[in-house]
Amino acid sequence: MTALAAAPAVGAVVWPTNNSDWTALTQNSKGYVDSSDGKDKSTDIRGSTSLSAGYYYFDDDQFLLMFRMRINKSPFDKKGKWEKNVWQVLFETDGTQSTIDWALQLDQSKSKTNNRVEFGSVSHGSNDTWLNLGISDTTWNSSTLFRAVATGETKFDQKDDYFIDMAIPYQVFASNTGLAIGDTFTVGLSSSSQHNTVNKDTPDGKNPNQGPFSDSVTFNPAAIPEPSSVLLTGAGLAALWMLRRRRKRVRPRIEAARSPPPPSSTA
Ligand SMILES: [Ca+2]
Ligand SMILES: [Ca+2]
Ligand SMILES: [Ca+2]
């Protein structure tokens, strides 16, 4: 298998510069709503119809899918260490709306596998409220593709809110879920004290399997606008040529993801 040239070097992830660079997750075409949930504010996901609780971004330079959630408080304690929690992006990818299928999460639970972002499948127990996130030592994970930053824009409950940002290489996401460019899926946001389940905030306090999930999400590099014609002089022209050249190289790799290998072991 050809190595993905655009895969980021360890520690070199570049996040979008501005909040406005991200695309809001929506519900009925408005912001993803999540109301207040109890006292543990660093796991309290918050968002309204105008200030979404969640966002996504497809970086086709680094070939990363990025997700962001808004939480009510800094996830760091007074010593600057991560609180022992897990922040989760849930995916409904197979079209059966009643079951979530995959989870991307930042695990700071101080379990054996903490301080990393991880991606695994979701299995369902005998009742629909029980979830087993298929996270194990062999799960895909990264010790660099996450961060927390102050939102700089909202203060629910009078104190600064934070964004938890996570990223996953597109190739990992596509090969596991079987989703290709242009396919659609939906997203739920949750949090937990343990990395194998959901036990803190659920999608607006509901059963995590029952959503509410976002409106359909899709990633399409071709939809990214070309540079403005204002740039089409000198260095601008060279940059545009390089960009187009790179996209021509990248596209076949995207297409290659349409024939995914069997899911990696996540048992
Ligand atoms: Ca909440
Ligand atoms: Ca707050
Ligand atoms: Ca499903």
Image (spheres, rainbow, N blue to C red):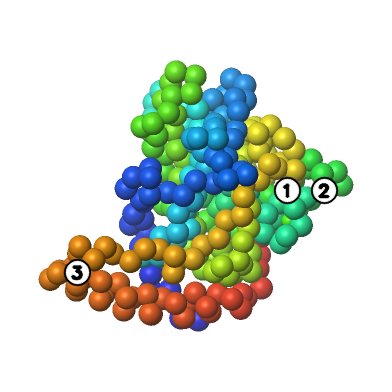
Q: Look at the numbered disc 1 and give the secondary structure of its residue.
A: strand
Disc 3, ligand 2: is the CB inside 8 Å? Answer: no
* The quarter of the displayed image where residue 202 is located: top right
Q: Mark on residue 132?
A: 1
In the image, farthest residue toward the front? 229
- Mark nearest the camera among 1 and 3 is 3
Q: Residues within 10 Å of mark 2 (few under 14, many from 20)?
A: few
Residue 35 on image: x %, y %: 60, 28
* The quarter of the displayed image where residue 102 is located: bottom right
Residues at circles 1 and 3 in contact by the CB criterion of under 8 Å: no
Residue 222 on image: x %, y %: 44, 69
| Nearer the observer, 64 or 146 | 64
Identify the residue shown where x is 60% and y is 58%: 139
Give the labeled residue for mark 3.
232
Q: Amino acid at mark 1?
A: Asn
Residues at circles 1 and 2 in contact by the CB criterion of under 8 Å: yes
In the visual, does 19 lie left or right of 211?
left
Identify the residue shown where x is 41% and y is 60%: 59
Q: Residues within 10 Å of mark 1 (few under 14, many from 20)?
A: some
Q: Earlier in the sequence, mark 2 or mark 3?
A: 2
Identify the residue shown where x is 73% and y is 60%: 95
Give the labeled residue for mark 2.
125
Q: Amino acid at mark 3?
A: Leu
In the visual, does 240 lie left or right of 112?
left
Q: Look at the numbered disc 3 and give the secondary structure of its residue.
A: loop
| Nearer the observer, 129 or 70 | 70
Q: Look at the numbered disc 2 and give the secondary structure of its residue.
A: loop
Q: Earlier in the sequence, mark 1 or mark 2?
A: 2
| Nearer the observer, 73 or 143 | 73
Disc 1, ligand 3: is the CB inside 8 Å? Answer: no
